[in-house]
Image (cartoon, rainbow, N blue to C red):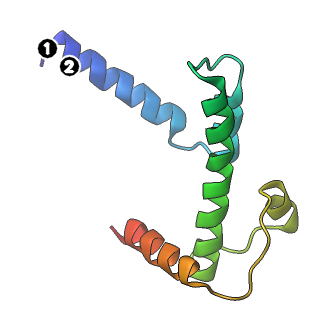
Amino acid sequence: MGCAERGALECASRRQEEWSDCTAEKAYEKLSSADVRVTNQSDKDDQLPKILALDGRVSAVAQRLGICPPASPGVMKSRRMRPSREPTRELAEEAVAVKRVLTA
């Protein structure tokens, strides 16, 4: 293995260590920092909220599948989520996708 490959593996290992235990809220906080510079600020502004939205959707599906306990109302409010009592086709499709990922 050459120097470039070792360097790439070391960099990947450091990134994995830095982000592997990161919650969506922590990721949002890190990435929204002024230290994270981007070419197009409007892209950053548009994409960052999607981290929390995706986390909320995955959590809701996991709860409905019985994989994790329900989030507290404070967490749901911070994620701008509303509990839903009626399953929808979209939710069913998300549940199937999440189940595939979790059982892979």
The quarter holding residue 67 reads bottom right
Left or right relative to 26: residue 19 = left
Residue at x 44%, y 77% (from the top left corner): 96
Q: Cα distance, mark 1 to mark 2?
A: 5 Å
x and y percentages locating residue 47 in the rendered image: 61, 40
Q: Which type of secondary structure does the marked residue at label 1 adopt?
A: loop
- Report if the CB atoms under discs 1 and 2 are less than 8 Å apart: yes
Residue at x 58%, y 65% (from the top left corner): 58
**Residue 59 position (above or below residue 29):** below
Label 2 packing within 10 angstroms: few (<14), some (14-19), many (20+): few
Residue 96 vs residue 20, the one in the foreground: 96
**Residue 79 position (above or below residue 58):** above
Residue at x 42%, y 68% (from the top left corner): 102
Q: Amino acid at mark 2?
A: Glu
The quarter holding residue 74 reads bottom right
Label 1 packing within 10 angstroms: few (<14), some (14-19), many (20+): few
Give the total of numbered labels.
2
Residue at x 62%, y 47% (from the top left corner): 51
**Residue 12 position (above or below residue 55):** above
x and y percentages locating residue 88 in the rendered image: 61, 84
* Label placed on residue 21: none
Task: Look at the image and tell me in which quarter the N terminus lies.
Answer: top left
Q: Which type of secondary structure does the marked residue at label 2 adopt?
A: helix
Q: Amino acid at mark 1?
A: Gly
x and y percentages locating residue 28 in the rendered image: 67, 39
Residue where numbered disc 1 is placed: 2
Residue where numbered disc 2 is placed: 5
